[in-house]
Image (tube, helix red, strand yellow):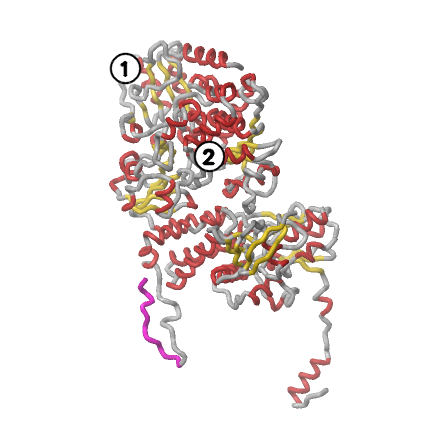
Amino acid sequence: MIIDDLTEITEKELASRKKFTIRCCVAAGCVSSNSVGVKEALERAVRDAGLEDQVEVRGVGCMKLCCQGPLVQVDERNESPGATVEIRSVDTGPLYQKVTPEDASALIGTLQGGSSNLSQADPKHPFFAEQLPIVLANSGVIDPDRIESYIAAEGYQALHDVLRELTPKDVLDSVLQSGLRGRGGAGYPTGLKWGTVAKTPGTQKYVICNADEGDPGAFMDRSVLESDPHSVLEGMAIAGYAVGASQGFIYVRAEYPLAITRLQTAIKQAKQLGLLGSGIFESPFNFNIDLRIGAGAFVCGEETALMASVEGKRGTPRPRPPFPAESGLYGCPTLINNVETFANIAPIIRKGAEWFSGIGTEKSKGTKVFALAGKITNTGLIEVPMGTPLRKIVELMGGGAPDGGQIKAVQTGGPSGGCIPADALDTPVDYESLTQLGSIMGSGGMIVMDETTRMVDVARFFMEFCMDESCGKCIPCRAGTVQMHEILTRILNRKATRRDLEKLEELCDMVRHTSLCGLGQTAPNPVISTLRYFRNEYSELLVEDAYGPRRNGNGQCAQPTADSTL
Amino acid sequence: MAAKTLTIDGKQISADQGATILDAATDAGITIPTLCHLDGVYDVGACRLCLVEVAGINKLLPACTTRVHEGMVIKTDSERLRKYRRMTLELLFAERNHVCAVCVANGHCELQSLAYSLGMDHVRYDYRFPKWGVDNTHTLFGMDHNRCILCMRCVRVCWHIEGAGTKNVSGRGSGSQIISDLNQPWGTSDTCTRCGKCVMACPTGALFAKGATVSEMERDRTRLEFIVTAREKKQWIA
């Protein structure tokens, strides 16, 4: 494979484009509402109408407005003949929503000038118009099952440039200058992490992609893997070159069967074309990627537990230091990044670090993908520049709470995050601002709650999640979450007193500061943040001490205290 | 090997490069409470009792796995640490069925003596009273899961000292359990070499040598006669 081969594939791919491209979403969200059936019906309808030479029905990745799936977009070829890359004409093509297989012939009929009363989404709605796709640029455009489709969208160009024109140091500098920070949640500067692994001596190094997305309500990484698997492979290969690793692993959870299949296909195709393997682009660089399937443990998203799991051991975290960059997988220096982080790499190399660092805020660069879920009108995926106010995301783009409800809080960061109350919605979304509010950026799950949501319920839900997912290694997390869950249940059952609440707060503090890994250290966060903003909801549920007012030594009632008020 | 100088609890000490805070403190005669640590096997930092405060670092660090650095200033004892340690013990006592009065290890149990020394005089959390079983299938040893604190000492000595690999952990969270081989009765294990290291390593009465308590309980029937005579005849026979 040389650069001419890439160009040739691109030209062939673009030349084969027909007059109409019908893009039908085949990511997990739409598949669950029978988009595969829709796609087959569309193909049949095209055949029946005798339009095979004019219409291509293409399975594509996520088109973001998941709640209205299956989504189908009709794209008429109108770019100039000299176009060199795959593009999508967002403004022109009608976007049909909730398409059923029965709608297929009517939809094809519209191509021949017919009219239909199919339900359409408005591509000019802020939900689409305010997005800035970098990670999701190819999502909903290319066919995730065909590497040619990715190559036609400038795919593997960055890898070529890196291998043939840049030194590993240049790549590290680029990533550092871009200001990219880890998208897994903690926001550690990616360039710094890469630099540490590159500088650590070692003959064998590893690159790991953490695709063990486990936060309730989060589905960003799944969508990236299902819609654009090659962008992750390309990012990993570039990382391998920069840090000096020849082997990569993608640790993906078994609950994502479609993502696993797409990744397997993608790896196979990349190997066939020589884009993975030995001597990539006729350079001395070798890089292979293997999949490791998680067995359903949330804690395996923690990097040290993940590596133990890749090694075939019990997935429990270990104390850091040593950090993976120093001693990781099989004791070798290891670079471990999230799916979205790797997906950002190729665009940064292609368009330059300055371009990337021009997006976002001073300390948080680039864009962030969020999965909007919960009590919100437009459930789906959005990618916005860092620093976008939360209000714009949930009210303008997300369309607010359905049925005229009032938004009460937004939960970010999953079980490690916190609830942001409605009056703080004007906060810009970046790592520091969210931390200040007692939540975290997290991997990108955003659960919206309206006034019918009871915050104590929310806290208990997340505590139950952490209790179930604790690995059991360290005592504060294993036994502390059980006790916190017990107290929260008692509060909800109106059996808890003020003293129980004190005990709960004491436990929150203890578990946070003494747990071994991030899971335990952040497990109390949903309780802490709901207590911070919605304390009254807790106190309303408290009851008087079951033993009545305290008695003094003589068996007489002491003066009633102000126990019941907080 | 270069030596490092550091301060622990206001005392200037020197320690080998590569030593852990726990090693350094022990050398200097400073006691840090530990539970999952066992001399001779590698540390896992699981019990969180040896957490110490290191100046300049926000997080509490486990003394057993943190290496010493030049000029470190460490506090092994503070009101906050004592409180966390007591709470950790409370959580342990509430988690399973630790009834000292009927335990084979009563009086020589590390959990019990830590509770004494750290002043954990009562448990404020709800006892969980889980239903754990006792595995008495092994000819020499028994395992009472009710007393297990999941310190993994037995697993570590079994794998890394004896090399048998019999003991392991199944389940997760509060449902974690020490198992033998593929979660089968200990007595049917093919890999167990009956070395007894796990029993020696156990800090509580969870793993015990059979017969150590029961066969020692010899009955003194004359005591019955003494009580009956005392009650009926008001005579205190010798």
- Give the image location of residue A101, x and y in percent: 37, 23
B31 and A78: which one is in front?
A: B31
- Give the image location of residue A451, x and y in percent: 29, 47
* Image quarter hosting the N terminus of chain A: top right
> For residue A562: magenta?
yes
Name the residue rendered at 42%, 41% in the picture.
A216
Q: Which residues are magenta?
A: A554-566
A113 and A557: which one is in front?
A: A557
Q: Is residue B203 above or below residue A28?
A: below
| Subunit bearing disc 1 | A
- Please state which of the two labelled residues, at mark 2 or mark 1, is closer to the viewer: 2
Label at residue A89: none
Query: Could you tell me the amino acid type at mark 2?
Result: Thr
* Image quarter hosting the C terminus of chain A: bottom left
> For residue B199: magenta?
no
When asked about the image quadrant of residue B25, the answer is bottom right
Q: Is residue A547 above or below residue B145?
A: below
Q: Is residue A349 above or below residue A534?
A: above
Query: Could you tell me the amino acid type at mark 1?
Result: Gly
| Subunit bearing disc 2 | A
Q: Which residue is mark 1?
A: A114
Q: Is residue B117 left or right of residue A228?
A: right
Q: Earlier in the sequence, mark 2 or mark 1?
A: 1
